[in-house]
Image: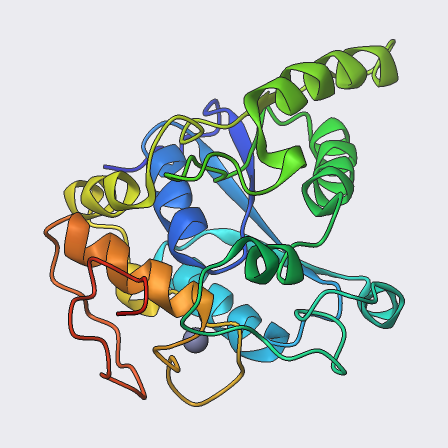
């Protein structure tokens, strides 16, 4: 089911082309016209991720834009996603590994740009696909309290202008619940890209691939992804033996 009438409200969906944002786009497509917004901030896996985003957007027949701030990447040192002197961690989802793939304040700065666009386009909603994990919320700006405070900031920043709502409908969900929901929505998860590397197929062993594999296994959903490495005995348990 899609909503695309002229009176249908607009949702600006922060859209990486990954699993969560693909399901998020399918979620809002039922009730809103979509404006999918991708960001090139110089991330290592950017070309592959952004290409997947274009594919998913085309499949959903959605308006899609990529905002390029790639000059930011080299300045975000210390994070393996943007700092090429760092190695992308694999197989060991330790606290140190999680820190190395976290870009502090990323949700904040991409949401800021999305809100400005939503104000210009009179969008009803700005939506992000942040979610819960067994370890809690890995990013400080992915937590419910952050978004509650952020909505108040939007209210203050938009005085006299259109005020969009900032929504995070998956914030209480685990990734496998998002996958199971994506199956029900028939979201094109097979076209999404999760891997932190930029290979021809998903590497299968980086932290992002491990969580993707685990989510399909725990969500009891067939995993349509082609992985370079099948070297995980039990994909529902990403921890090393
Ligand atoms: Zn990978």
Q: Pinpoint residue 106: horizontal percent, then vertical percent.
A: 72, 47
The quadrant where ligand 1 appears is bottom left
Q: Pinpoint residue 25: horizontal percent, then vertical percent.
A: 41, 44
In the shown orientation, is residue 71 left or right of residue 170? Answer: right
Q: Residue at x 35, y 66 (%)?
A: 210
Q: Residue at x 80, y 17 (%)?
A: 153
Q: Pinpoint residue 100: horizontal percent, then vertical percent.
A: 65, 62
Q: Is residue 184 above or below residue 171?
A: below
Instruction: Give the position of the N terminus as an image quadrant.
Output: top left
Please state which of residues 125 and 143 is positioned toward the viewer in this rendering.
143
Q: Does any portion of residue 203 appear in the rendered image?
A: yes
Instruction: Give the position of the C terminus as an image quadrant.
Output: bottom left
Q: Is residue 97 above or below residue 112?
A: below
Quadrant of res 203: bottom left
Please state which of residues 146 and 97 is positioned toward the viewer in this rendering.
97
Quadrant of res 119: top right
Q: Is residue 240 above or below residue 31?
A: below
Please state which of residues 175 and 50 is positioned toward the viewer in this rendering.
175
């Amino acid at each position: 089911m899609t909503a695309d009438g002229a009176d249908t409200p607009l949702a600006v969906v922060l859209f990486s082309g990954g699993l969560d944002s693909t399901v998020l786009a399918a979620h809002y497509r039922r009730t809103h016209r979509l404006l999918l917004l991708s960001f090139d901030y110089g991330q290592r896996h950017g070309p592959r991720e952004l290409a997947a985003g274009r594919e998913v957007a085309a499949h959903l027949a959605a308006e899609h834009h990529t905002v390029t701030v790639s000059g930011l990447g080299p300045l975000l040192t210390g994070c393996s996603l943007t700092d090429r002197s760092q190695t992308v961690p694999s197989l060991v989802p330790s606290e140190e590994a999680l820190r190395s793939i976290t870009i502090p304040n990323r949700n904040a700065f991409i949401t800021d740009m999305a809100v400005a666009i939503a104000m210009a386009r009179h969008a009803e909603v700005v939506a992000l696909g942040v979610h819960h994990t067994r370890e809690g919320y890995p990013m400080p700006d992915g937590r419910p309290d952050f978004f509650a405070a952020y909505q108040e900031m939007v209210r203050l920043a938009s005085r006299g202008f259109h005020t969009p709502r900032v929504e995070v409908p998956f914030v209480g969900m685990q990734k496998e619940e998002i996958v199971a929901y994506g199956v029900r929505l028939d979201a094109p998860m097979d076209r999404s890209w999760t891997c932190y590397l930029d290979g021809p197929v998903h590497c299968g062993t980086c932290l992002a691939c491990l969580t993707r594999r685990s989510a399909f296994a725990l969500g009891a959903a067939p995993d349509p992804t082609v992985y370079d490495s099948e070297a995980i005995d039990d994909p529902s348990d990403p921890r090393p033996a």
